[in-house]
């Protein structure tokens, strides 16, 4: 079985599984193929057991289907980075007492993840100075932020946003698993999942969740040294420490924390010295049982310019995707934010906004702020006419955007078929290809989600849309006609 067969197997699984499940359980698997056998390596025992219980049967089936009949390999599932596995970092299994998060994770997969058994692949451990509050750091409470100063020539400010708590975080399908994992980290810092790695697009609540854990840890133990910082800050501090000959203080400081929260670690990309320093800090914290939470705008393996050994370590705990919120969650977020602003937002008004602003929560918040400001300025309650007035330019821009209808009409006309053919179940090439192109254009040119596009094409499943997009992407590379059709259609639709 070649890696390309495995990639096909992955593409099938991606079509079949909800993206969060695929990203959390299947993507971290590494493959090693040899004669007559393939071994899949999970980053830890927990992932291995979960995959074994839930997905292994289907994986073995796909491998068998996709391999030539004369060379159907045996499939094995194991833990580790290929053969370099030794259980140096294996941790104690701990039971969470949070029934709520347990229920959630139960709901997701019918099992309770209680353990993150980390495995080492050849780390040289560095002594950790993990004495609570006896490093150079100083934590003070109160105010909107908690401040930290560092001696040794480095003045460093780090802050936990007090408003970012679990209470103010609205839960929905898109962030349910991340929220549950974060909550378990609060229950069992350093043990439940270490590191907890949250990834996803901008403005989806990763930073909020990370602070929620930090705030909860400080609430449980006011002496806990919880340090939040952006990865660029880590880099800047390190450079400064090097300039001031204070690198030992820098090391001591970061290794003395109880929890280290680093945001947007994609900024480590290409910064080799910082990665080196962070690598050692990471190992020391992991060894000391100190919690790490990391966020990133993409799946760790996809960060270019990041050392492989770091990427692989990021997978030792739990890697969870935060997805864009679906309509109901967007409405719930708007209602919650309005409540925090002590503003009355009728639910039809919340729906109106949520249907039009789909990209991310930060944008949703920005739009709500505009509406609230108009309402206060005009001294009028919020209703749909007021929203239309205050969001005039945004809505006008959206009206200009390409609609599904428009795409379907244009594609049908271009291929001289009927719009109803695009909606139909007909699978002949003359209809199926234009339909796949129309779905791809809908994905590329509108803000509609995959399920919405599927719905707009005769009630199809989102996996069909995903498959169409992949197929067209492939064809645009290999087939000049399709490439030309796609470009012509884009031109027709956007000019
Ligand atoms: N589920 C949610 N419930 C309530 N507020 C949310 C939720 N998700 C995001 N927000 C709010 O949206 C804003 C953006 O979220 P946040 O900064 O956490 O995003 P992010 O994923 O870290 O994005 P970036 O990668 O750009 O930093 C914040 O004000 C946050 O409070």
Image (tube, helix red, strand yellow):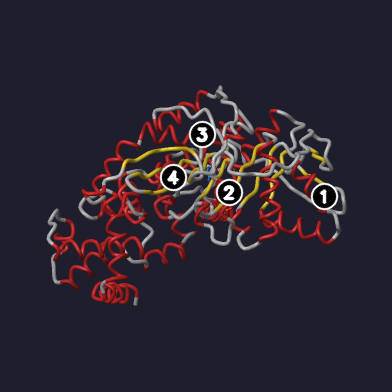
Q: Residue at x 41, y 66 (%)?
A: 396
Give the mark toward the camera: 2 or 4: 4
Q: Secondary structure at mark 3?
A: helix
Is 248 on the left-hand or right-hand side of 174? Answer: right
Is 285 on the left-hand or right-hand side of 57? Answer: right
Q: Return the mark for residue 29.
A: 4
In the image, residue 197 sits, relative to residue 91, either above or below, namely below
Q: Which circle's residue, 2 or 4, is located before the other in the chain?
A: 4
Q: Residue at x 49, y 48 (%)?
A: 382
| Label 3: how many Cα within 10 Å (few below 14, some 14–19, many 20+) | some
Observer-nearest of 221 and 348: 221
Observer-nearest of 447 and 371: 447
Asked if the beta carbon under badge 2 is closer than 8 A to the nearest atom of ligand 1, the reply is yes
Q: Which circle's residue, 1 or 4, is located before the other in the chain?
A: 4
Q: CA distance from mark 2 to mark 4?
A: 20 Å
Q: Residue at x 82, y 47 (%)?
A: 149
Q: CA distance from mark 4 to mark 3?
A: 22 Å
**Residue 394, visible in the rendered structure:** yes
**Residue that mark 2 sits on:** 295
Q: Which circle's residue, 3 or 2, is located before the other in the chain?
A: 3
- Quadrant location of residue 285? top right
Q: CA distance from mark 1 to mark 2?
A: 26 Å
**Residue that mark 1 sits on:** 248
Give percent across and percent down for residue 51: 40, 36
């Amino acid at each position: 079985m070649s890696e390309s067969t495995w990639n096909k197997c992955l593409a099938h699984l991606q079509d079949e599984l909800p993206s969060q499940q695929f990203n959390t359980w299947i993507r971290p698997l590494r493959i090693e193929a040899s004669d007559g056998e393939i071994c899949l390596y999970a980053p830890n025992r927990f992932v291995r057991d979960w995959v074994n219980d839930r997905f292994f049967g289907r994986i073995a089936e796909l491998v068998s289907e996709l391999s030539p009949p004369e060379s159907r390999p045996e499939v094995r599932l194991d833990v580790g980075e290929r053969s370099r596995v030794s259980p140096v970092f294996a941790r104690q299994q701990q039971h969470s007492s949070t029934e709520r998060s347990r229920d959630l994770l139960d709901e997701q997969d019918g099992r309770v993840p209680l353990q993150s058994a980390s495995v080492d692949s050849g780390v040289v451990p560095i002594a950790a100075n993990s004495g609570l509050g006896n490093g150079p750091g100083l934590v003070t409470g109160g105010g909107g932020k908690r401040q930290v100063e560092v001696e040794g020539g480095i003045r460093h400010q780090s802050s936990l946003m007090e408003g970012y708590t679990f209470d103010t975080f609205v839960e929905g399908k898109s962030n349910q698993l991340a929220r549950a994992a974060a909550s378990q980290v609060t229950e069992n810092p350093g043990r439940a999942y270490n590191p907890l790695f949250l990834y996803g697009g901008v403005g989806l609540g990763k930073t909020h969740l990370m602070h929620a854990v930090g705030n909860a840890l400080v609430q449980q133990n006011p002496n806990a040294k919880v340090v939040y910082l952006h990865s660029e800050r880590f880099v800047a501090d390190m450079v400064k420490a090097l300039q001031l000959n204070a690198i030992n203080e820098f090391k001591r400081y970061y290794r003395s924390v109880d929890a280290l929260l680093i945001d947007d670690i994609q900024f480590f990309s290409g910064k080799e010295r910082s990665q080196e320093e962070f690598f050692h800090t990471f190992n020391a914290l992991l060894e000391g049982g100190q919690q790490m939470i990391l966020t990133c705008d993409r799946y760790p393996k996809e960060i270019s310019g990041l050392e492989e050994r770091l990427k692989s370590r990021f997978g030792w705990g739990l890697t969870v995707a935060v997805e864009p919120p679906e309509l109901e969650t967007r409405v719930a977020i708007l209602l919650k934010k309005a409540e925090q602003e002590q503003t009355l937002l009728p639910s039809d008004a919340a729906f109106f906004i949520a249907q039009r602003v789909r990209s991310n929560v930060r944008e949703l918040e920005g739009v709500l702020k505009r509406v609230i400001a108009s309402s206060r300025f005009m001294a009028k309650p919020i209703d749909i006419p007021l929203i239309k007035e205050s969001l005039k330019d945004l809505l006008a821009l959206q009206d200009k955007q390409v609609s599904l209808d428009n795409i379907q009409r244009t594609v049908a006309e271009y291929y001289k078929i009927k719009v109803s053919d695009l909606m139909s179940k007909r699978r002949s090439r003359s209809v199926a290809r234009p339909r796949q192109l129309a779905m791809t254009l809908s994905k590329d040119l509108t803000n509609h989600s995959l399920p919405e596009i599927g719905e707009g094409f005769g009630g199809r499943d989102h996996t069909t849309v995903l498959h169409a997009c992949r197929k067209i992407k492939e064809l645009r590379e290999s087939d000049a006609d399709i490439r030309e059709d796609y470009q012509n259609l884009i031109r027709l639709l956007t000019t």
